[in-house]
Amino acid sequence: MMIIILLVFIVLVVIAFIAIYNRLVVKRMRVDNGWAQIDVQLKRRYDLIPNLVETVKGYAAHEKETFEKIAALRSRAMGATNPKEAAEANNMLTQTLKSLFAVVENYPQLKANENFLKLQEELTATENKISFARQFYNDVVMDYNTMIQKFPQTVVASMFGFKEREFFEAPAEERETVPKVKF
Amino acid sequence: MRDNLYDLIAANKRKTVIFIIITSIFLGALGYAVVNVFNWGLIGYIGFALFIIIYNIILYYNSDKIALSATGSVPADPEEFKTLHNVVDEVCIAAGVPKPKVFITPSPAPNAFATGRNPKNASIAVTTGLLEVMNRQELQGVIAHEIAHVRNYDMLLMTVVAAIGGLIILLRDFFLRSMLFGGRRRSRGRSSGQLGLILIVIGLVLAIIAPIFVALIRAAISRQREYLADASGAYITRYPQGLAQALAKLRDHHKPLKRASQSNAHLFIASPFGKDRINVASWFATHPPIDQRIDRLHKLVI
């Protein structure tokens, strides 16, 4: 009798283990997927920036300093290896792009350039996609991190090496308002 | 005390469930009365019920095509309407749903609607008038509201509500006809004459209030879903002001949308009918007053 009870108990524990493990895997996959989505949009932005800079250069060649800063930040962002680095570099890039668009205000001809307008719309859309992808990513990271800290999930998590993930931090000023970019 | 968004969504879901339960009880009571008083019509009754259900299933599977062609919507060209497509892309990333098909409705009345039975088969249509008056952030708010409708499976819900409503009306008609053509003969043949009489009285009362009741329930559910879509739309963009501003513009630029009908009114972001129809019968309105919606958005805590 005792043996049967013990066996049933062990079976139940094993089933619970498997269930928790599977849920952890699913949530970790969501985090990876969320990150991949951000990555796609970041790459899109890295592709758009040289085009934009070229177009602006044609009208405002002497804003050299801003162009150089953008180029440096772009390569720094592209070389980032983890969410934290990528977030930092990209937030700075966003700021610099904002100042570039502020500069553009002084060049009415450029503002009327069709190619520029197209690029501006594309970049606005990409910025918004980045912030929405980041929002989505942070939501799933929060969900995942909460789960691996709960008991008894934390036991399974530490046994199989499920580690907490980093958030993709939003720039400080955006936390107050909203991650909407309008150049 | 400001409302938490999750509370609001939960409260809305609760109310919707309560509405459906009340409607189902009502339907059950009416069906019971009919079947008990006139047992000769059971097969007809089942047949009609099946017809209504099948009819609504077919309607449900083709609802997007019906709504799109009824409003004369055409697919939005990805180059010509680049910004619109971009905004839809953005909102879909935020909501975690696949991108729906995007349509343009040629009409000066600013409005938008979503249709389709699930997020994989969804379509969104905006009027040319909407694109004229909205800026990018407001457009984002409007699209988020529509995506929220899709994600909340409102098409399914409203189809079910319409089907139940159709059944109630059908039963009422059936009941009244049976009263006129020889139903009494059957009930007198039964032993419990008193019970039969009570059932007839209940049936008559139900018959009189049924259509009013159906319209009220349907409109009330539709209004709840509008609030819910506002709240979840705001949650998708985390920017209630965008939608609130858009709603204010919809209020100020309000024009009736031709070719909108009672059957698809609940799909639109703002009531597609003229102002008179909004004010006269607020109980029967498919949309809550816009000022109230704006007010609720301002009170949201994201």
Image: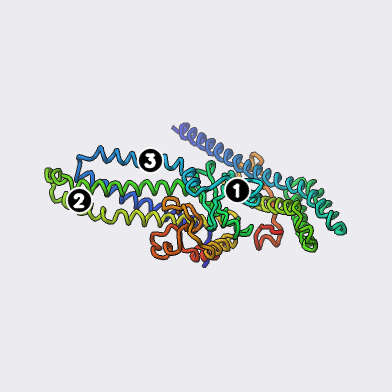
Residue B282 position, x and y percent, is 40, 63
Residue B199 marker: 2
Circle nearer the viewer, 3 or 1: 3
Q: In the rendered structure, are the residues bearing label 2 and label 3 in contact, judged by CB atoms less than 8 Å apart?
A: no
Amino acid at pointer 3: Tyr
Residue B80 position, x and y percent, is 65, 48
Amino acid at pointer 2: Leu
Residue that badge 1 annotates: B92
Q: Does label 2 or label 3 sit earlier along the sequence? A: 3
Res B232 seen here: no
Residue A42 position, x and y percent, is 73, 47
Amino acid at pointer 1: Cys
Residue A143 marker: none
- Closer to the camera, B227 or B263? B263
Q: In the rendered structure, are the residues bearing label 3 and label 1 in contact, judged by CB atoms less than 8 Å apart?
A: no
Relative to B299, A128 lies left or right: right
SS state under label 1: helix
